[in-house]
Every structure is written in structure tokens, then in C-alpha cells.
Amino acid sequence: MSGEPAVLILEDGRSFRGRSFGAVGTTVGEAVFNTGMTGYQETLTDPSYQGQVVVMTAPHVGNTGMNDEDPESRQIWVAGYVVRDPSPIASNWRSRGSLDEALVTAGVVGIRDIDTRALTRHLRDRGAMRVGIFSGEAATTDTDELLARVRRAPEMAGCSLTDDVTTDEPYVVPALGEERYVVAAVDLGIKSMTPHRMAERGMTVHVVPADIDTDTLLELGRDGIFLSNGPGDPATADHAVALVQAALAARRPLFGICFGHQMLGRALGFGTYKLRFGHRGVNQPVQDLRTGRVAITAHNHGFAVDAAVGEELSTPFGRVEVSHVCLNDNVVEGLRCLDVPAFSVQYHPEAAAGPHDAADLFDEFAALMDGAR
């Protein structure tokens, strides 16, 4: 695993030199860091990372290789990948290839052998920003020219990415065992484990494209509507907001996660804003304000809902409260409607790689649908 010369350049001019990892070439995107110690395959295949160059804070990555069971979608979505020490061997009984080989096959440009701790501290202090990775011949180009290319790349704020990741055609994930509910899940960048978790609870899930019309959505989601995670700026997703408002007006039970949480927030009249460096990883502490319980949760978001914590809020759809907050920075992590059957969380309760503290939220969705009958 020798690798060709590579350089990473941030939009503020700071640079790191290392060796290529994965495909050799050029990529640009938004630099973000993931604090998970495990689950790199799920991270790579999470559509919410579309357009982002992911820096892994865990120093040793790739130990267990890549398998055929853990992908969360049809492809690797990250725009680029940054690691310190990739494992030279893949050792796991399920492994079907190495991480490096998977990145090469997917055409994902990465860099290794750099100080990812220093890079993460820089992003934590300065905020997520545009970045470029240049390897092979591109790494020999004049640094000022490479920096100019990074600064010409679009910023994540104002970026609409839903159309890039949503399914082209509807598909059905049948209930496991007896069918108890029929749910429509709007694919804003859905992960494969999400409908599986619902199917485990007797839900037949119709996964539908993000551009579905409201009448069809309500017809397919006979018992409930689900809004998935996804990439991009929530301020650009007006059609998804309209879908949520239609479901609220019809009093159809609704559950949103991550980007879907932001859609519920916007539908209720709240704004959204970009976080300094976001929450990404499988070790984020979130408190349920109703019970005081703290769950360790999986996150991947760079935007948040702007709503007041600790008070009952008035919206066009009745009373709403902030139900969950992040204990690291008090960011809103959940909303609960008090007059219509709807709630949301900013994190990922399906969490294939763990933790599973929040899996009971799918049971809450089932209870919400039971209550509406």
C-alpha cells in the first residue's frame, strides 16, 4: 500500500500532504469529521454524505474490510475519504475485499498518512469548509491554483442534493410476519436498515421518490408517513415541506429522522441554520426532556432546527415542544406535536453499526399509528 503523492487543501489555505488512498485523481467537497470508532462501511454508503469529504477521527480504519451485508444503499456516496493509518490487511469472516479496493472501484479519491487529529481540531475550531484532495499528477500542480479550484466549489449552504440520492422508482419492503401497518417512506436519502427496522415491527413500507405528489403519498401511507435522512441544505427542500404539511393537515401519523426532522421543523414554521461543524458519528449524547433519559446516538447532520427549548410553541398545526436536545451543545434533536400525531428526531435510530439506544422510537411510531385508529 505505497500510494502516490497526495495533498489535501482547505479553503482557508491550510494543507496536508500524504499518500493517495482509493482512487487517484481530484475531488472537492465539504470537509467534515466523523467521530465513530466503527461502522465505516455504513458511513461510506450513507446518502447523507453526498458532496462531503469525510475525515475519520479514528486513527486505524479498514481492519474488517468490506462485506456484502452492511451497505446502507446502492453505492458509496462520500465525495472523498481521509484516514491516518489504513489497515494493510482486512481480517473478518464476512470480508469480501479491502476498503482501498472498494474506494478504487467506486472512483472515490482519498488521502492517508496525514495528521487527522490536527485536521479535525482545525475543522472544530474554524468550522466545516470546502476542501480538495489532489493525488498523482494533480498533486504536483501549483498550490495557489489548487486552492482556487477549492474556492470555486459550491458551498453546502444553499445546496439541494435530494434529487441526487432519492430512488428513481417506488419499491416495497414487506412486513416481517403479520402486517400491522402500511407506511409510506419518503426517500430523501434513506438507508436500507430504516425500512428493515419498520418491517420488524409489522410495517409494510412503500419507499417512494422525493418528488411524489401529496395525494399518492397519503394513499400509499394508509397508516403513517415517514421522512428519511438525506443530504443538503434543508432550506432548499420546499416540496418535502409541502408533503409534511399535507400529512399534518390530514392528521396522518408522521415520523421524521435527520433531514426528515428538519422538514417537520420547517413545515411547522421553524427556521433552520448551519452548524459550525455538525454532528457526525455513533457516540452523540441526546437527552429526552420528557424523561431525562440520555441515549448515545448516531448522527450525520450539518444543519439544525431553530426552535426554543423548554417552552410550549405555537404553530399553524397546534402546540409543539422540543423533545430532545444534544448534551454537547444544546442543539434541538427532537420535536413533538401535541395536537397532531407527529414527531421527529435529528439522529438515526436505525443505527446499523450501533448504538441501539434509540431503536424504541420505531415502537413509538407504531404506537402513534395505533392511537390514530
Image (cartoon, grey):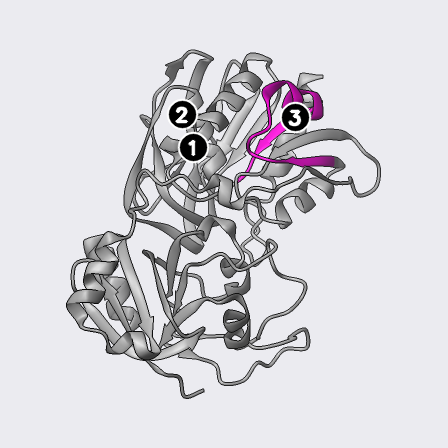
The answer to whether marks 2 and 1 mark residues whose Cβ atoms lie closer than 8 Å is yes
Q: Mark 1, residues whose alpha carbon is within 10 Å: few (<14), some, or many (≥20)? A: many
Q: Secondary structure at mark 2?
A: helix
Q: Which residues are magenta?
A: 204-228
**Closer to the N terminus: mark 1 or mark 3?**
3
Q: Residue at x 55, y 70 (%)?
A: 105
Quadrant containing the C terminus in the rendered view: top right
* In the foreground, 159 or 126: 159
**Label 3 belongs to which residue?**
224
* In the foreground, 77 or 271: 77
Q: Residue at x 68, y 77 (%)?
A: 93
Q: Secondary structure at mark 3?
A: strand
Residue type for callout 3: Gly
Q: Mark 2, residues whose alpha carbon is within 10 Å: few (<14), some, or many (≥20)? A: many
Vertical placement of residue 281 versus 83, above or below: above
Q: Position of residue 275 (x, y in %)?
A: 29, 43
Q: Position of residue 111 (x, y in %)?
A: 36, 73
Q: Position of residue 39 (x, y in %)?
A: 52, 63
Furthest residue to the right? 178
Q: Residue at x 23, y 74 (%)?
A: 141
Quadrant containing the N terminus in the rendered view: bottom left
**Label 2 belongs to which residue?**
266
